[in-house]
Image (cartoon, helix red, strand yellow):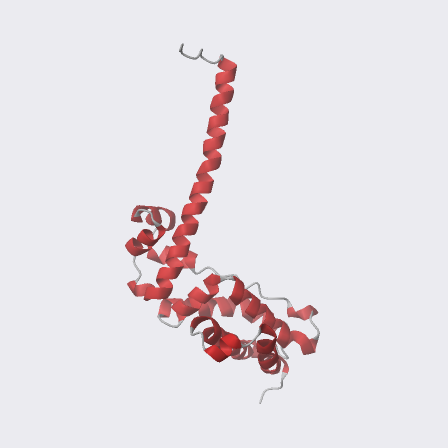
Amino acid sequence: MADSAPLPPAAADAADIRAATVAAGARPRRSDATRAAILAAARDRFAADGYERATIRAIARDAGIDPSMVMRYYGNKEGLFAAASEIDLRAPDLTGVPRGERGARLVRHFLERWERDETLTGMLRVGVTNEAGAERMRGVFRDQMGPVIAAVCPAPDEAPARAALIASQILGMALCRYVLHLPPAVGLSRDEVVGWLAPTVQRYLTAELP
């Protein structure tokens, strides 16, 4: 069979442009997939081994890539942990919620978040096993929940204490239900959990100081 005739210059240029465009489009997709694999492996490894014992080599092996790729994207273990533990609680604005319904709104919101986002569960596991994870969780609740509570509590200076009490209920149930898998806690329906916890959270939000 005769060799194919060369493309005219204009056609060759167009082919080169198409090839470059495809390649440029493929690189971000591969990059995104690699990053996602690294972060998923990191969350699992940090949750299983804790921050101190988790290694870049083990995380890379779990992700099926070379350790140099982890370093390329995240620099070091500290940078990887920060990325893997990035959490958006998507805390609801309670100012537009009727006063007597705010406790139930918060509890229901967090149940939905825990059940949809494995990152939250993974970071809770890390938080109860090492200081780096605990500090990360403290920062998340302080920075994201503090303003939400301050906006609706009787006095803004009471917000930190009220937020901590609310966190004790939300995190306590999450620990029992999604990490320890205590049968009674797991067996409760979402409405039952809301029914039990909402009055307590509501009291922490609105009751006068004891």
Q: Position of residue 139 (x, y in %)?
A: 46, 67
- Residue 167 appears in the picture as rendered: no
**Residue farthest front in this picture:** 1
Of residue 188 and residue 176, the one placed in the foreground of this image is 188
Residue at image coords 46%, 62%: 119
Q: Position of residue 44 (x, y in %)?
A: 38, 61
- Residue 189 appears in the picture as rendered: yes
Give the image quarter of residue 189.
bottom right
Image quarter hosting the C terminus: bottom right
Q: Position of residue 168 (x, y in %)?
A: 50, 78
Residue 192 shown left or right of residue 68 in the figure: right
Residue 100 shown left or right of residue 49 in the figure: right
Image quarter hosting the N terminus: top left
Q: Position of residue 26 (x, y in %)?
A: 46, 37
Q: Is residue 37 above or below residue 88?
A: above
Residue at image coords 61%, 75%: 191
Residue 35 shown left or right of residue 159 in the figure: left
Q: How many marks?
A: 0
Residue at image coords 43%, 51%: 36
**Residue farthest bottom in this picture:** 210
